[in-house]
Structures are given as C-alpha cells and as structure tokens.
C-alpha cells in the first residue's frame, strides 16, 4: 500500500508542465516533493537496512571460505602487540556454543512446606566437553601450523597481512612460515 502511494506521489511530481493547466505554484510543487520524500523515508524504514544485511552476508561468506586464513595480533592492555600469527580458519569466542546452554528436565527439584515440587524445569546443560559452569571471556584460534592459541585480552584480526611497527613481545621461533609482514 505504501509503495502505491509512493509511486503515485512520484508520478505527480514528474508530470510534465501543463498537466494542471499551468505549472503548479512553487509551494504546491514543494509540497508534492516533500510528500514524496516522506513516503520514500517511510518505505525505507519499513525494510531492513540493506547495508547492514550486506555486511553481515559479507562476513558470513568470508568466514565460511574453505582454507580461510586470518592475520591476528594479540594486544596487551597498553595496545602493544604481544603475538602475531596466521590462523587456519576463524577465531572463536569462548561464549560461542554449538548447543544450547540449557535443557529441560522433568522431575523433582526440591521440597517446599507441602512436599516435593514436580514439573518441567529449565536446567543448565553441560558444555560440549561435559563440563558445567562458565569461564573467563577469551578467543581461541588454530594457527596455520596447527597450534592452539587462546587470549583473554584485546586483539586485532584481518583477512590481509597486518603491518606492525612494533615487534611482538612473544615470538614463536618454531614457526618458519609465519613471519611478521
């Protein structure tokens, strides 16, 4: 319905001179243009922001590429590089899960003054490794040569090599093919 109004308003704005018998007065023309702009703004707000959608899709495609390699710099609290390496795949947050963090459980949960409480309850589920509870926030990555890296500080990740002006504090000398660029 809004699209029909928008098209009608745009069509009115674009009518050739003389359709009204003479050009509409400037105030009427401005009014029509204002109404057309308002209709366009309403139509734009009624749809999802295409730029946001495009960026999310870009990231999804980039992070899903087979053979993805990312360049990662772990930074200390002062912003100095601690370590620089290339990943095999993307880095992941400690807060990401492949399963739900909860589960339904039927049964008795405790005793009130009238007796036991029965029903369906939402309970914390164990993590994929069977453990319960939470841990510190961190990211973890797999390096191009298969090493595990975990960091609970600031970091910078790019799909292009990163030019560092300060050498990292930690240098993994066992990696010959992952030199600072």
Image (cartoon, grey):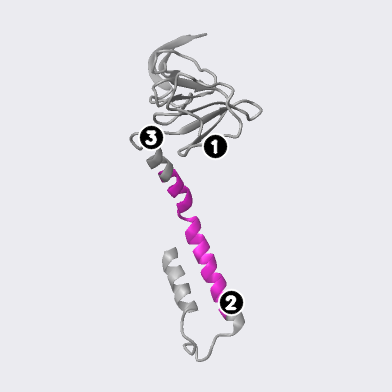
Secondary structure category for the residue under label 3:
loop
Which region is colored magenta? 29-57
Name the residue rendered at 63%, 30% in the picture: 79
Q: If you read the primary sequence from the N terminus, does the residue marked by circle 2 or circle 1 appear first?
A: 2
Q: Quadrant of residue 92?
A: top left
Magenta part, dominant SS: helix
Whether residue 49 appears in this view of the structure is no
Residue 131 placement (x, y as % from top left): 43, 13
Real-space CA distance between mark 2 and mark 1, rounded to the nearest whole angstrom: 53 Å
Numbered disc 1: secondary structure = loop
Q: Secondary structure at mark 2?
A: helix
Residue sitting at the far front: 176
Give the residue at mark 1. Answer: 163
Q: x%, y% of residue 142? A: 42, 24
Across and down, in percent, residue 124 comes to: 45, 18
* Residue sitting nearer the eye, 97 or 44: 97
Q: Which residue is mark 2?
A: 30
The residue carrying pointer 2 sits among few (fewer than 14), some (14 to 19) or many (20 or more) residues within 10 Å by Cα, namely: few
Residue 96 sits above or below residue 2 on the image: above
The residue lying toward the viewer, choosing from 8 and 119, is: 8
Q: Earlier in the sequence, mark 3 or mark 2?
A: 2
Which quadrant of the view contains residue 177? top left
Instruction: State which tag comes first along the sequence, 3 or 1.
Output: 3
Residue 108 or 100: which is nearer the viewer? 100
Q: Which residue is mark 3?
A: 68
Residue 32 in view (yes/no): yes
**Mark 1 Cα-neighbour bin, 10 Å: few <14, some 14–19, many ≥20:** few
């Amino acid at each position: 319905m809004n699209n029909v109004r928008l098209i009608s308003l745009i069509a009115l704005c674009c009518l050739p001179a003389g359709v009204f018998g003479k050009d509409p007065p400037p105030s009427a023309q401005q009014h029509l243009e204002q109404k057309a702009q308002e209709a366009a703004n309403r139509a734009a707000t009624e749809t999802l922001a295409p730029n946001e959608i495009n960026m999310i899709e870009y990231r999804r495609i980039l992070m899903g590429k087979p053979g993805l390699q990312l360049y990662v710099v772990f930074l200390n609290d002062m912003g100095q590089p601690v370590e620089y390496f290339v990943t095999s795949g993307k880095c992941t947050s400690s807060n990401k899960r492949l399963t739900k963090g909860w589960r339904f459980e039927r049964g008795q949960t405790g005793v009130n003054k009238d007796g036991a409480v029965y029903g369906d309850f939402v309970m914390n589920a164990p993590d994929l490794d069977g453990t319960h509870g939470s841990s510190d926030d961190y990211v973890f990555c797999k390096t191009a040569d298969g090493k595990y890296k975990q960091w609970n500080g600031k970091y910078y990740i790019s799909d292009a090599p990163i030019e560092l002006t300060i050498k990292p504090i930690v240098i993994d000398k066992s990696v010959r093919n992952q030199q600072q660029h």
